Amino acid sequence: MAHSSPILNHKNQFLFSFISKTSNSNSHSHYSLRLAKPPLSLGFSSSSSPSPSPSLTPRLPVARVTTAPVEFAPPPPPEFDFRREISRLKALRSRLSRCESLRERLRIVGGDRIVKDFFGSGRSGFSRVLASLNLCSYELFLLKCLVATGQEHVLTFGFQFVDDEFESARGSIKSALYALVGMIEKLDVNGGGGELNGIGLTLNDEDIGDLRKLLKILGEVEQFYDCIGGIIGYQITVFELLAEAKAERRTTKRSKHKHELMNCQFLEIHAPSGLDLAQNTEYALEAALWGIEGLPYLGEIYPLGGSADRLGLVDPDTGDCLPAAMLPYCGRTLLEGLIRDLQAREFLYFKIYGKQCITPVAIMTSSAKNNHEHIASLCERLGWFGRGQSSFQLFEQPLVPTVSAEEGQWLVSKPFSLVCKPGGHGVIWKLAHDKGVFKWFFDQGRRGATVRQVSNVVAATDLTLLALAGIGLHQGKKLGFASCKRNLGATEGINVLIEKKTLDGIWAYGLSCIEYTEFEKFGIADGPLSPNSLQAEFPANTNILYVDLPSAELVGSSNYGNSLPGMVLNTKKQISFVDYYGKPQSVAGGRLECTMQNIADSFFNTYSSRCYKGVEDMLDTFIVFNKRRRVTSSAKKKRRHADKCLHQTPDGSLLDILRNACDLLSQCNIKLPEIEGNDKYVDSGPPFLILLHPALGPLWEITRQKFYGGSISKGSELQVEVAEFLWRNIQLDGSLVIEADSVMGSTRIDENGEHILQYGHRCGRCRLENVKVLNKGIDWNCGDSVYWKHAVQRFEACKIILHGNAEFEATDVTIQGNHIFEVPDGYKLKVTSESSGMQVKLYPIGKNMMDSGSWYWNYKINGTHIQLELAEL
């Protein structure tokens, strides 16, 4: 039954009613507006409501009316029937799957009762506008699929409001009035245009543009999710996951539920075992050598499409929101950091084998926060990092609708405008197939790839990535995880060994991942942990992967749901957006996400009988472990001013970088201050700054042969941006900054006209032996310093700047105070001591040494080790 309350009645010309009704097609209650005999102009004046924006103000003189509070208590809405909607949509999906033509599909979806009601009755008025828009058959099909899923509110111009989206009936009325003001601006006072419930309506250019954007999004959802039934299948999955979550809240029978989840009779999860790189160092070094040797057969994959809302990153000049890849971290963007790490491995390959190797890099972007444009622009601005544009493949993931947590309604910020987010990094496998990325890799002879996320700034530390890729290539594995100890209570998933008995009696085993949002499904308690809890047994999922490309392509090309692995709907977070009136909104909801690492679920090994110990050695999936700060430390959320926790913040990840540097240099007989817990530095900043270019290694075994002896005092700063480097017995108290234009080589123009970095060609070089560097260094009391950006104020510093193939040498000398040693291309600067202090001399480099330098490190493999010899010309 419908109940109406007249709110405004001006001279019998205008009637505005608020109606609570329950529709057969929508089992939830909602409010709607009804207009009759519209006036030529109308304005509102209300002390209880904000004024509409100037753009919504009527232009003609108006009769003023006031509003008074109206008490309205709608009946409680009946519970949404997920089972009925899922059944209806599955039947519709089944009928559509049998259609052979678009015309037949239009007929089938048009026969759905909700679609017939919406487009046939004209109650929404939208069907009367369609004729003027010249939509093609496919666009009409997309809109009818949208309505079939129960999302007609996207098209109804703000006439409907779901009652539980507002705090009270009064708040609903106020919002409805705002919507009405917006619609009045669109009234055709001359009586022209289409009819909408008796109102003359003209869609302006902005409306039409929004509708076209909506159609584009719907087309992408329909096409990308074709393996599960397009738009219809997307909403079926949303309903299934919401119903599943609701059922979980009502039952404690977790064991039965997880069996149903995995479609099996028996299911157990175990803590996985694998190679510990920190313990079994000899095998770890051998695996790393496999990774170096196999570099010409490897690609690199970066899923950079996430919106990174928790970083709150904005462009300081424009105020535009920025994606995580653009975060300025330690003097460069996070994306530049990924490429530096990759080039360090390629430089190592050159030093060992004397061959140039450029790894193809595939980057998944999205349109969220103009992610794709920012990343492409950065690559172009930096000359594609001296790798050539042809070595990159950027492919954009589609955005997907966000949904409310209760009934799965798609969220809208204004008519036709969906609130969208990226669909999770798990879409990468199907998208890579759809966009030809796998073929691109294969054409370049690549068999495997390493995968890492942009926010993890330590993933390439020492052995981790090289050993992971080496084992995957050498042993012919399909998928590998790099893992570590999980932080208790962290919002991160876990790696597990799954053992299950399928319905046909076959035993299946494989390594996989369980997201922290899915713990309850597997009977794992959520919340704060104790050392003896179940979660403490399992290692962390870090999203650092090795993947066999042919195996991944087989999954991505599948026309089934497994091409979208690990679909989840996390509704534990609020969806924030700005509505039509510029008001911030926050709604409990989520979006359908796929999890990249759950491609592992397609790589289970099966056996006729149950296996016990040693099964992991036989699997197509594997895992390696290392110390946590050498595997994962993320800069993924902005630290709030009063927050004492640095976990997953840029501040906390910088401390892990410094701990790694301390671990490394301490093994070189260099004395350093101790680094205490994060809480010690919440307000004071780090105890020192040490930033080393990854090409100094990247394996620590190599770096240790370039550094030996000396000390670094508390509050000091060391930055080394050069690969050909020697440190012997240096005492640093203050700031020492060494920068080179040509860290690993110099660029040449290839046959395609691209600037390509030639490894080992005309590098900058620096040798320091028995040197004391003393200056006032960083102003640690400066409130403007941001240490994780490496944006610091200094009192004094010793700076060495090397242009081109310039060389710097300092021997048996004390360099005290503020100094800048800038060495031009083709010259060597020597600093030594004399009775009056320092002696500084500049020498030209001999022509026979211009390319190779007057000295260089010679790399040789000896068993499982890499030994360095200093060669001088």
Image: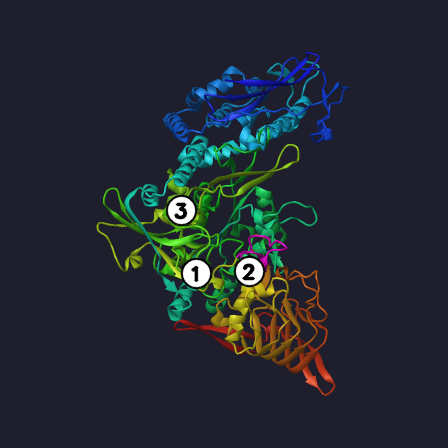
**Amino acid at circle 1:** Lys
Give the magenta-colored segment's residue range: 634-654
Q: Earlier in the sequence, mark 1 or mark 3?
A: 1
What is the spatial separation of the Cα atoms under label 3 and label 2, in whole angstroms? 29 Å
SS assignment at label 2: helix
Q: Is residue 760 visible?
A: no
Residue sitting nearer the eye, 760 or 151: 151
| Mark 3 vs 2: CB contact within 8 A | no
Q: Residues within 10 Å of mark 3 (few under 14, many from 20)?
A: some
- Mark 1 vs mark 3, foreground winner is 3
Residue sitting nearer the eye, 833 or 479: 479
In this rendering, the answer to whether 23 lies above or below 472 is above
Q: Earlier in the sequence, mark 1 or mark 2?
A: 1
Percent coordinates x, y for residue 305 in the rendering: 53, 46
Q: Which residue is rendered at x = 57% and y = 45% of the image?
A: 372
Q: Earlier in the sequence, mark 3 or mark 2?
A: 3
SS assignment at label 3: helix
Q: Residues within 10 Å of mark 1 (few under 14, many from 20)?
A: some
What is the spatial separation of the Cα atoms under label 1 and label 3, in whole angstroms? 21 Å
SS assignment at label 1: loop
Q: Residues within 10 Å of mark 2 (few under 14, many from 20)?
A: many
**Amino acid at circle 2:** Ser
- Mark 3 vs mark 2, foreground winner is 3
What is the spatial separation of the Cα atoms under label 1 and label 2, in whole angstroms? 16 Å
**Amino acid at circle 3:** Glu
Query: What residue is pinned by disc 3?
Result: 520
Query: What residue is pinned by disc 1?
Result: 485
Query: What residue is pinned by disc 2?
Result: 653
Residue sitting nearer the eye, 260 or 237: 260
Percent coordinates x, y for residue 109 in the rendering: 44, 23
- Residue 636 is one of the magenta-drawn residues: yes
